[in-house]
Image: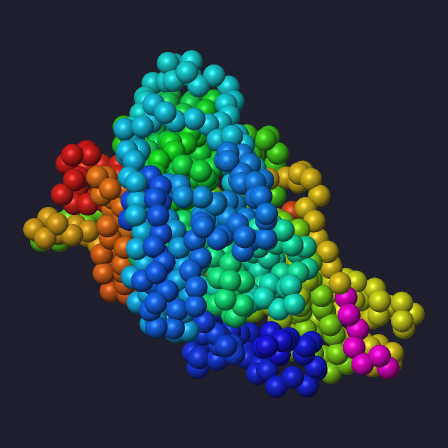
């Protein structure tokens, strides 16, 4: 089976096709079906596992009767809490019991799933049946007899906010404080001429990538080898190593093409851990693929939120105070924090700002990051409140934002590395045809109500340790090797462009090897951090390569002409390799944020109760755009998700049983092509001098930040009714007004 995982360095004569830099490099592979996803892989002697999940939300497993299931055709074994510790390899395992202990573990508590008989949420895996075929495993899983004791469950976010507490880490993702204050907010609110103080609600939501989460696990000579659909092979390898008490080098994870993720494949989830346990039990490779309903309880979700926002301003619209308090639904054992207050600290030039985040632990699965976590949800509350303030003051919404433009980071006092936010407002308004003024901008077309709205957004820079290897051949062909995943964002297009710029060779002559822990370390593809991290490592590898070449030739070949390759040819080495290792070195002297301004037109049909987005413009500041085709695709995709967030997406809960009830794509509504207009994307600004990667800033998630608020504000313009809850439903507008 070793050859299945082989990835010998590509020779310069590799037959891999070259494509024009104006298209996505990976597109042809995906279109013709040559790109393999995790569940596509086949190995000899393969078996299949099917999860059995708890129907109750709180209680315990009383007994598991294996007899009927084990007598089914093709069944090889069952993994449960009864044998998990033995399979894991611990004679007397010690399980983390507090959220703080769980957070310190690389496996983020995935091993708690089968630690004991405790049930903490409906849909929790309690067993896995392994058989020689998927059909036999599924049949036997239904035959497995499990008796439960059901305890009183705890659900309902707003019913339990009195039990809320601050995160044990005191932080939101990215290391920013969950609670902070500058100035004196309470006194500033008292002095304000106009105050907006409202509550904004957003439901639990699920990622629903097309590719189901899947793991194919096998053990070979004490080494765990795993195919897994994830956003960072090295991160998953570290988690599995932790779970089984192995050195990380004893775990190999392969994750090349990933069919969508949006955050739900960032970490090790129970199914990946269970697949490895199952393989150890039957001593054969095991493939485990989640069903669509299992995806709703098995790989996290954007948690339900209740946010209180208070804005105080003087009569000219200058913000005097911002107060933002968030209550976040959390699971019983996890500490995921939806960081919706983070950008409130930096968005506007306001001297008095208070933010607070509190968790409410309920009997639901763990939450996790979902595209622009915290920023998409937090911007809905803040930017809707800003629109309400503009209405109260009778000021144009764009003008209100310009009056409160932050010329430097208002929280840290650092200068911006660059900011083209004002250009975003100007260009977006111009392309949209925004009619400035305080009066209503929409109108009527027969029975249809037309509304215009806008909102802004920002996204910070995240960077993590990363390494990369670059090999250059005399023919001018180069190969990059780094262990990142390709989740659809365009890494196979962008990374070659970085090498092209650094070495002065055509991007189509550069290949990317990726998606394997046998390659140099790369972080997870989340937080829009890959260019800032892996891109920086690639640049350092190119510098190392050129330095080695200078050493060998005692010359200084110029980048961008034939001297570089001529010098390499003279060495007679056949190729030369550079290695780059990047690690963020403390705090930057500047603050780095990407910016966006969204402008939206909605059409409301009061007879049918429908709300449609008819026009949408996004003006985006991400510094240097390394790959226009993939960057534009990212913004369009993010805006599409924002439209879904605003109008359709919600995971509905039966509070009697603590169960999700719309766990398929027939009932969990996401936008389809007919729901989305042509989205006009305009990139503005100049290369950012403070990022260290050719002037590029974060681009993967900024496109969703502020979208829901822009739509909500357009709905108000059309109807005069304020939407303060997502998704926006026509029949509830009057209730929220």
Q: Say above or below: 143 vs 508.
A: above
Say how the picture is coloured: rainbow
Above-or-below relation of 249 to 374:
below
Q: Based on the displayed image, in which of its 4 quarters is residue 223 positioned?
A: bottom right
Instruction: Pick the residue in front: 140 or 411.
Output: 140
Residue furthest out toward the right: 554
Residue pictured at 14% horizontal, 36% vertical? 734
Residue 610 in the magenta stretch? The answer is no
In the rendered image, residue 67, in percent from the top left (x then y), is placed at 34, 60
- At x 16%, y 45%, the residue is 730
Q: Looking at this view, is 554 or 442 the one in front?
A: 554
Question: Is 229 on the left or on the right of 697, as rendered?
Answer: left
In x, y percent, where is residue 146? Answer: 31, 51
The residue depicted at 70 percent of the width and 49 percent of the height is 583
* Quarter of the rendering occupied by the N terminus: bottom right
Going by the image, does 406 lie left or right of 195?
A: right
Q: Which residues are magenta?
A: 572-578
Q: Position of residue 598 (x, y in %)?
A: 37, 49
């Amino acid at each position: 089976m070793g050859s299945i995982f082989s990835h010998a360095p590509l020779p310069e004569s590799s037959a891999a096709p070259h494509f024009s830099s104006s298209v996505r490099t990976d597109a042809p592979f995906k279109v013709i079906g040559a790109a393999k996803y995790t569940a596509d892989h086949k190995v000899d002697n393969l078996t299949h596992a099917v999860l059995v999940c708890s129907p109750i939300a709180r209680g315990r497993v009383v007994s598991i009767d294996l007899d009927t299931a084990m007598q089914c055709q093709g069944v090889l074994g069952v993994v449960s809490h009864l044998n998990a510790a033995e399979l894991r390899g611990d004679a007397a395992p010690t399980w983390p019991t507090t959220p703080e202990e769980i957070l310190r573990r690389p496996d983020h508590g995935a091993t708690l799933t089968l630690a004991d008989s405790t049930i903490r949420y409906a849909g929790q895996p309690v067993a896995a049946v392994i058989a020689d075929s998927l059909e036999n495993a599924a049949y036997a899983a239904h035959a497995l007899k499990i008796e439960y004791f059901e305890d009183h469950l705890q659900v309902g976010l707003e019913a339990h906010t009195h039990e809320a507490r601050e995160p044990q880490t005191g932080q939101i993702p990215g290391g920013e404080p969950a609670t902070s204050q500058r100035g004196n907010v309470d006194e500033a609110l008292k002095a304000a001429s106009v105050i907006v103080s409202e509550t904004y609600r957003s439901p639990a939501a699920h990622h629903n990538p097309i590719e189901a989460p899947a793991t194919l696990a096998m053990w070979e000579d004490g080494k765990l080898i795993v195919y897994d659909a994830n956003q960072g092979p090295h991160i998953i390898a570290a988690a599995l190593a932790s779970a089984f008490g192995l050195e990380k080098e004893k775990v190999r994870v392969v994750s090349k093409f990933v069919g969508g993720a949006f955050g739900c494949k960032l970490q090790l989830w129970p199914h990946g851990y269970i697949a490895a346990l199952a393989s150890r039990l039957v001593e054969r490779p095991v493939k485990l693929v989640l069903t669509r309903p299992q995806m709703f309880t098995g790989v996290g979700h954007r948690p339900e939120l209740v946010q209180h926002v208070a804005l105080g301003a003087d009569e000219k619209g200058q913000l005097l105070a911002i107060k933002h308090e968030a209550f976040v639904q959390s699971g019983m054992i996890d500490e995921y924090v939806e960081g919706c207050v983070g950008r409130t600290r930096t968005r506007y030039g306001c001297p008095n700002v208070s933010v607070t985040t509190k968790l409410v632990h309920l009997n639901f699965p763990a939450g996790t990051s979902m595209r622009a976590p915290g920023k998409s949800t937090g911007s809905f509350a803040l930017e809707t409140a800003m629109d309400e303030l503009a209405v109260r003051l009778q000021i144009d919404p764009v003008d209100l934002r310009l009056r409160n433009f932050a010329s430097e980071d208002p929280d840290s006092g650092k200068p911006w590395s660059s900011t083209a936010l004002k250009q975003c407002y100007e260009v977006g308004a111009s392309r949209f045809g925004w009619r400035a003024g305080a009066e209503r901008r929409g109108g009527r077309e027969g029975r249809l109500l037309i509304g215009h709205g806008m909102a802004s957004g920002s996204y910070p820079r995240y960077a993590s340790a990363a390494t990369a290897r670059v090999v250059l051949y005399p023919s001018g062909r180069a190969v990059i090797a780094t262990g990142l995943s390709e989740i659809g964002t365009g890494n196979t297009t962008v990374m070659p462009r970085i090498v092209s710029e650094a070495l002065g060779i055509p991007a189509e002559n550069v290949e990317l090897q990726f998606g394997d822990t046998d390659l140099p370390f790369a972080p997870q593809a989340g937080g829009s951090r890959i260019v800032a991290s892996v891109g920086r490592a690639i640049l350092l590898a190119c510098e190392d390569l050129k330095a080695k070449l200078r050493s060998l030739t005692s010359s200084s070949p110029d980048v961008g002409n034939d001297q570089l390759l001529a010098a390499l040819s003279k060495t007679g080495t056949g190729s030369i390799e550079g290695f780059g290792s990047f690690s963020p070195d403390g705090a930057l002297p500047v603050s780095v944020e990407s910016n966006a301004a969204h402008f939206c037109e909605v059409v409301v049909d009061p007879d049918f109760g429908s709300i449609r987005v008819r026009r949408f413009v996004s003006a985006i500041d991400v510094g240097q755009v390394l790959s226009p085709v993939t960057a534009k695709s990212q913004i369009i995709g993010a805006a599409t998700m924002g439209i879904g967030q605003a109008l359709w997406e919600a995971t509905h809960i039966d509070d009697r049983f603590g169960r999700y009830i719309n766990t398929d794509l027939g009932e969990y509504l996401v936008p389809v092509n007919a729901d989305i207009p042509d989205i006009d994307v305009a990139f503005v600004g100049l290369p950012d001098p403070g990022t260290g990667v050719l002037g590029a800033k974060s681009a993967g998630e900024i496109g969703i930040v502020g979208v829901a608020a822009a739509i909500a504000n357009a709905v108000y313009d059309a109807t005069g009714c304020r939407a303060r809850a997502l998704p926006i439903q026509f029949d509830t507008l009057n209730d929220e007004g």
